[in-house]
Image: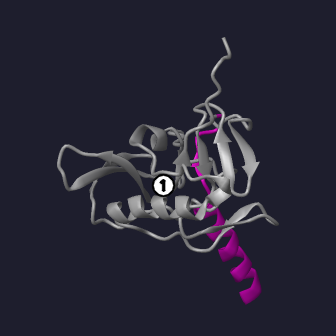
Amino acid sequence: MMRVIGVCLLALCSQLSAQDCVPGTTWPTDRFAILGDGVVKDTLTGLAWKQCFEGQTFDRRTGQCAGEAVKFGWRGAMRRAVGVNAEGFAGSSHWRVPNIKELASLINHACRAPAVDTRIFSNSSDIAWVWSNTPSISSNLSYAVDFKSGQDRALNRTTWSHVLLVKSGEVVLPLN
């Protein structure tokens, strides 16, 4: 009897933690191109994103992020981007904290808990606020996006929030 209850509770918990989207509103499967090594390209914006939040590592074998995402104050988030560039993650030294428009472009407003594409950002269900590099009018506030609800707002820069780094896509100029 206890085993049946345990299985039922497990099934209930998995339903409670599942992403909730309005039926028929999923994004096209070709929105993101997997580039490898934990990097995806957004074919809509041309931006390349780390698939894992800072503190997590990309597991090539499973194609998933492992470990706990670490929270930073806003200045710590900016310093983290500098550190990732010094490490040369995925052969690049152009990683940065995204601006608010770039970060908000990941949000699917028809989904909640999380409001991002879980096929790409698979370990995002426990992620709430994510920093942008966009300052507010007040010098001690900067904007962040709540990946659970999809909402954005200015937070005090001492607030501990998650970090997802981005880099601009390669620009190819015509020869003529």
Inspect the magenta stretch and tell me whether residue 152 lies in it: no
Q: Which residue sits at x=30%, y=65%?
A: 159
How many numbered circles does the render carry?
1
Residue 170 drawn above or below residue 60: above
Residue 50 drawn above or below residue 55: above
Residue 44 drawn above or below residue 165: above
Secondary structure, magenta segment, majority class: helix
Q: Point out residue 28 in the picture as x, y percentages from the top left corner.
A: 70, 34
Q: Which residue lies furthest to the bottom in this view?
A: 2
Which quadrant of the figure contains the C terminus? top right
Residue 31 as seen in the image, left or right of residue 139: right
Q: Which residue sits at x=39%, y=46%?
A: 151
Q: Can residue 1 be seen in this view?
A: no
Q: Which residue sits at x=52%, y=53%?
A: 165
Q: In which quarter of the image is residue 128?
A: bottom left
Which quadrant of the figure contains the N terminus? bottom right
Inspect the magenta stretch and tell me whether residue 22 lies in it: yes
Residue 32 drawn above or below residue 97: above
Which stretch did the figure color magenta? 1-24
The residue tagged 1 is 148
Q: Which residue sits at x=37%, y=49%?
A: 133
Dot 1 surroundings within 10 Å: few (below 14), some, or many (20 or more)?
A: many
Residue type at mark 1 is: Lys
Q: Which residue lies furthest to the front in this view?
A: 176
Viewer-closest of 124 and 50 = 50
Check disc 1 and report its element: helix, strand or loop: loop
Q: Is residue 57 visible?
A: yes
Viewer-closest of 139 and 17 = 139
Q: Point out residue 113 in the picture as x, y percentages from the top left corner.
A: 53, 55
Q: Point out residue 83 in the picture as x, y percentages from the top left corner.
A: 49, 65
Q: Which residue lies furthest to the top in this view?
A: 176
What kind of colouring is applied to the model shown? one colour
